[in-house]
Amino acid sequence: MKPVQKYSTLLSLYVAQSIPMSFFSTVLPVIMRMENYSLESIGLIQLMKLPWILKFFWSPWVDRNAGMKHGYKQWIIASELFYAVVIISIGFFSLAVDFKTIIVLMIVAFFLSATQDIASDALAIKILHKSQRSLGNSMQSSGNFLGTLFGSGVLLMLYASVGWRGLMFLLGGIVLVALLPLMFNVNNRETLAPANIKPPGWRDVFTFFRPAIVIRRVIFLMIFYSGILGILVMLKPFLVDLGYEVRKIGFISGIYGTAIGAGFAFLSGWIMKRIGNRSAILLMAFYSFLTALFFAIILVKNPVPVVIYTGVALLWSSYAMSTVVVYTVSMNLVRPGREGTDYSIQVVMTHISGLLIAVASGFIAGRFGYHGLFKLEATWAFLVMILSVLLYKEYGGRELWTYWFLKRKRVAWRLIRK
C-alpha cells in the first residue's frame, strides 16, 4: 500500500469519527438550550463520553476477535455501519418527546464509536511503518481537529435549515462515505496478527504495566501537555470575563483555534519525521513552555485583540503538536496482537490526567485568579520540559514484540532498553 493511501484512509476515518462526537458533545447542548431544556438535562448528555474513558476494558476482546480472526478492517466496517444506523435512527425521535431514548441511543453510538476507534488505532499501527507513524498520527490529530471544526461549527449553522432529522441523516451519511478509502485501500490480511501469537485476554490490561519502562512512558504521556491544558480549559471563561460575546468566543476558540490546530498537527508529524522523536519532544515541550509563558507574562497584562489572537494561535498549535507526540509515542509501545489494547490504555491514561487537570484548573483559577493559573502552568511547563527529557527513552533495534517471540518476559524487556 502506498503511503498516500495509508494517510488518506486514516484521515477519512478520524474525520468521520470526530464529526458526530463533536456535534453531540458541543452542538447538541446549544440546540437543547434553544429548545428550553433544563441545565440538569443538558448535563446528563456528558454520560455519552463514558465509553471513551472505559474502552480499554473491551479492547482485548476487539484484539482477540479482530486481530486474531477477522481482521481490523472488517471490524471497522461493521462498527461504522452500526454507528451510522444508530445515528440515523436518532433522527426519527423528537428531542421534545423522546429525550431519554435519544440519550440511550447516543450512549450506544459512542460505544460503537469507541470500539471503532480501538480497531482504527490498531489498524494504523499495523499498516504504518515506524518511520511513517509521525505523519500517520498527524492524520489522526488533524482529522480530529477538522472533524471538530465541521461538527461544532458548520452543523450548528445548518441546523436552522435542515432541522434535527436532516442533521442526523447527514451525520450518518458522512460516516458511511468515510468507509470508502478503507474499503479500496486496505488489504484485510495485512491487519491480522501473526499465527504464533498467543490470543489476548483480560489479563493483558494489567500485565501491560508490569515493566518499569512502561511506567516511565505512561508518566511521560500523562504529563506531556499538562503545562498548557489548564490554560486551554480556562480559555473560554477567561474570554467571557474579558467581555467577549459568545459568538465571538465561538469563532476565536472553535473556528480560528481549531483551524490553527489542524494545520500545526500536519506540521508536527513532518517535524518528528525530520528530526526524530526525542528532538521533537524537546522542541515541542519548549514551545509549550513559551506558550504558557506568553499567557503568564504578556496576555494577562495587555489583553488587546491582537494579543488574544496570538495567544490562541500559540495555545492551539502547541496543543495540536503535543497530541501528535502523544499518539506517536503511544504507538511505539505496543505488543503484537495487543495493539488496540495497549494503545487504548495509554491514550485513556492521558484522558484521565486531562480530566484531573481540567478540574484542578478551575479550582486554581477560582482561588488565585487567571494570572495565578497562568503563572503556575508556565512553571509546570518548564518542569515538564525537563522531565520529558529524563523520562523518554528511545528503543534500539529489538522492539517490544521480542517478548512474544522469545516468550520470556524479563529477557525481552531488558533487550528493548538502551
Image (tube, rainbow, N blue to C red):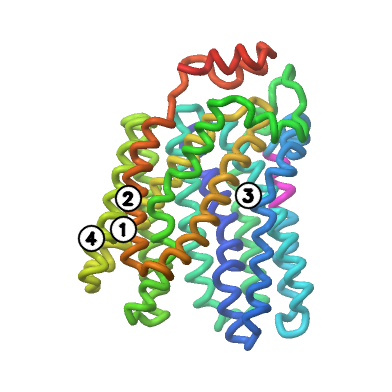
The secondary structure type at the circle numbered 1 is helix
Please, what is the three-letter code of the amino acid marked with disc 3? Leu
Q: CA distance from mark 1 to mark 3?
A: 45 Å
Please, what is the three-letter code of the amino acid marked with disc 2? Thr
Q: Nearer the viewer, residue 82 or 413?
A: 413
Q: Which residue is mark 3?
A: 179
What percent of the width, then of the height, locates residue 324?
Answer: 44, 43
For label 4, the crowd category at 10 Å Cα-Cα, with few meaning under 14, some 14 to 19 and many 20 or more, is some
Please, what is the three-letter code of the amino acid marked with disc 4? Ile
Which of the two labelled residues, at mark 4 and mark 2, occupies the earlier sequence position? 4
Residue 375, numbered circle: 1
User: Does 294 sit left or right of 110 as displayed?
Assistant: left
Q: CA distance from mark 3 to mark 2?
A: 44 Å
Which of the two labelled residues, at mark 1 and mark 3, occupies the earlier sequence position? 3
Bounds of the magenta span? 73-80
Whether residue 147 appears in magenta in the rendering, the answer is no
Residue 379, numbered circle: 2
Which of the two labelled residues, at mark 1 and mark 4, occupies the earlier sequence position? 4
Q: Nearer the viewer, residue 366 or 11?
A: 366
Q: Which residue is at a point 50% across and 77% down the rendered structure image?
A: 157
**Quadrant location of the C terminus?**
top left
The secondary structure type at the circle numbered 3 is helix
Residue 297, numbered circle: 4
